[in-house]
Amino acid sequence: MKRKSETQKILAVRDYRKGKKVADICREYDCAKSTFYTWVRPYTEKKNKYGTVKLKDLQLANDRIRKLENELEIIHNSSFFKELTLKDKKAGIDEQYGKYSVHELCDAFSLPTGTYYNHLFRNKNEKAWYIERRAMLSGKISDIFNTSRQTYGVKRVRHSLQRQGITISEKLVSELMHEMGLSPIQSSSKANYKKAIEQRRIDRLKQKFDVREPNIVWVSDMTCFDLNGRRMYICVYLDLYSRKVLAYNYGRNPSTNLAARTINEAIRKERPSKGLIVHTDNGGPYVSYSMSKITARFGITQSFSHPGTPHDNAVAEAFFRTLKKECIYRNNFKSEAEFKRELDDYIDFYNNQREQHYLRYNSPVQFELQMV
């Protein structure tokens, strides 16, 4: 009996599914019944908890997996791959970082995950690609989160990014959302919101701006200005002790994300102890649910100005008057990049060189060093 081709087997199975008798099929294809049933078996559908699965599809998938494993083994055994240095492997993973999980990338390059994580966290501040990609992803995640009215969690945010053609791991989405203080509305949100409403009108500072130690009281505010016909907003956090700028950011909207990014940056730099007071106005970003979660997580107590009373936050207001007079209004910025450079330079000058009467004619940094 001549061996049948795959095409002949498929045609025979198709006839069987159309209702043709097995005896007639075996006679037409000159095969035994037992042989014919071996042709049918791979194409038989089986049901399990995941739905209906064709055994033939499983067989093809297994063949594909074996083929990919063999291809990977060939690459790993090649002299080219064996000559790759540790630096080459790290650079290769850097190029694909965020598109696949770190474990998958490290397996592909035969590199221990611990080795790559050490490399990543040791050098991330020097890696423009790392910073730029995280900034881009953070902006898109924030947009998706806000568009969903703060209802999307990690899985739905990741799915929305994938629909935009962005490959990203669930772990990275979770990490970035955690950094920005983005948490979807939960069953407890109503109770937490009521609690925040009760606390947000309390002015714990009471215009007492003299502080004897650093990281006891911070103040924050936002201001806006026109940049080539487009509004830009700056958020800043100051330490009342030395009037030093702890963190600052800017954006096109006075959003919760802007305030959250800035306070997270200040917390990372200063690592304040629990009990820190942060005084702000009653603006939406500061009384938001996301901000209350950040402050609660780090043991920070919020304090708020009375409505319509800017003097309650006089130090932050004074800083912005100085910033606008000495930096923003003196320059005709041609681009956002030029504005960012000037802002960075001015903040550096303000913290390290600009003398203040309140600080006995020292800069904030000089004042802190003298007090130490």
Image: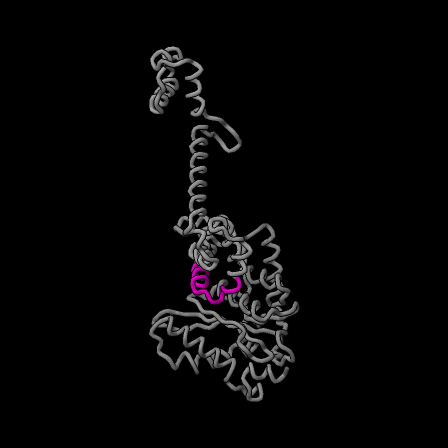
Does the magenta portion include 135? yes
The residue drawn where x is 65% and y is 80% is: 212
Q: Nearer the viewer, residue 255 or 159?
A: 159
Colour logic: one colour
The residue drawn where x is 38% and y is 71% is: 337
Image-based side of 42 in relation to 112, left or right: left
The residue drawn where x is 57% and y is 72% is: 305
Residue 185 screen position, x and y as percent: 55, 53
The image quadrant where one finds the N terminus is top left
Query: Which quarter of the picture shows residue 250?
Result: bottom left
Q: What main secondary structure does the magenta stretch of the protein show?
A: helix
Query: Which quarter of the picture shows residue 368?
Result: bottom right
Residue 43 screen position, x and y as percent: 42, 25
Q: Nearer the viewer, residue 258 or 270?
A: 270
The answer to whether one can see residue 157 in this image is no
Query: Which quarter of the picture shows residue 224?
Result: bottom left
Residue 346 screen position, x and y as percent: 45, 79
Toward the front, the furthest residue is 79
The residue drawn where x is 54% and y is 65% is: 264
Q: Nearer the viewer, residue 192 or 270?
A: 270
Please state the extent of the stretch shown in magenta in the rendering: 121-137
The image quadrant where one finds the C terminus is bottom right
Image-based side of 218 in relation to 253, left or right: right
